[in-house]
Amino acid sequence: MQKSMIRLLSVADCISITNAIFGFLAILFLVSEIIPAELRLRVSFSFILLALLTDGLDGIVARRLGKSDLGEYLESMADMTSLAIAPAVFIYFIYLEVVSCCVYRHVYLLFALVLFLAFAIIRLASFHIMKKDKFFVGLPASASTLILLIISYFNVEFIFILPAVIIIGAAMASNIPFTKPGLKINGIAAVLILLTLVFDKAFFGFAPILLLTAIGFYSIGGAIYLSKKSLKI
């Protein structure tokens, strides 16, 4: 007798589904007009951060408890919701008031977000095909999401957010190698995400700024390190 679809799932798959649910909830809260706008953004921001935590957790659980045949597909589908669609919608809502006055600004923002989404789709669809043992090909979707999420949450000037969205999106789908962080670095990132969840913008926004600095250092420093290493070889 053929197995039911539910029985095909592993523990790691359930965590991946939770990742997608967090991304979906992040979008739902943004469009819930019965909630004050500032609270909507805070809750949506928190759900995307929770999705990022579960995105890292499913890989750890899969290595410890094993993965199913659905694992790779589920992970990519979940990441599409939480690390591509939800951040794009979040950025749109952050800058909706800024672009509402001018049609051309609205078009620019939509163009940048559509490009970002297209790059994210390409990356997530090809991730398992182009996966390497020692490094990532292209900027990881998690790092891209964190960078754009934090800078938009701090309302970076509109003129800067457009090139940032396009450049970071293009970096995801590029052939640039990025180092694979070890367990300790991932642990530090998880702690910084938890601190950001707890403190939000309190104390001059130290937690999200520290998280953004760490991700920026990883993104730029890791790429430079691998480039120099390959030149030596």
Image (spheres, helix red, strand yellow):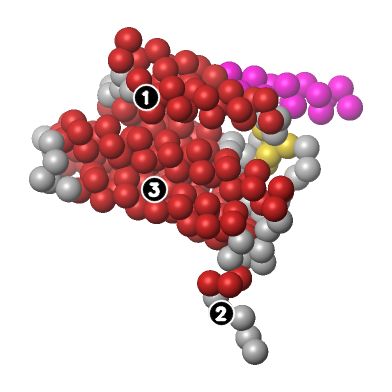
Q: Which residue is identified by label 3? A: 22
Quarter of the rendering containing residue 99: top left
Query: Residue 162: percent from the left, percent from the top?
Result: 35, 32
Q: Residues within 10 Å of mark 2 (few under 14, many from 20)?
A: few
The residue sitting at 65% across, 89% down in the picture is 1
Does label 2 or label 1 sit earlier along the sequence?
Answer: 2
**Mark sitting on residue 198:** 1
What range is drawn magenta here? 215-233
Q: Residue furthest right?
A: 233
List x then y, in percent, for residue 132: 75, 45
Q: Position of residue 201 (x, y in %)?
A: 31, 19
Q: Earlier in the sequence, mark 3 or mark 1?
A: 3
Q: What's the residue type where badge 2 is placed?
A: Ser
Alpha-carbon span between mark 2 and mark 1: 40 Å
Which SS type dominates the magenta stretch?
helix
Residue designated by label 2: 4
Dot 3 amino acid type: Phe
Identity of the residue drawn at 39% across and 40% down: 48
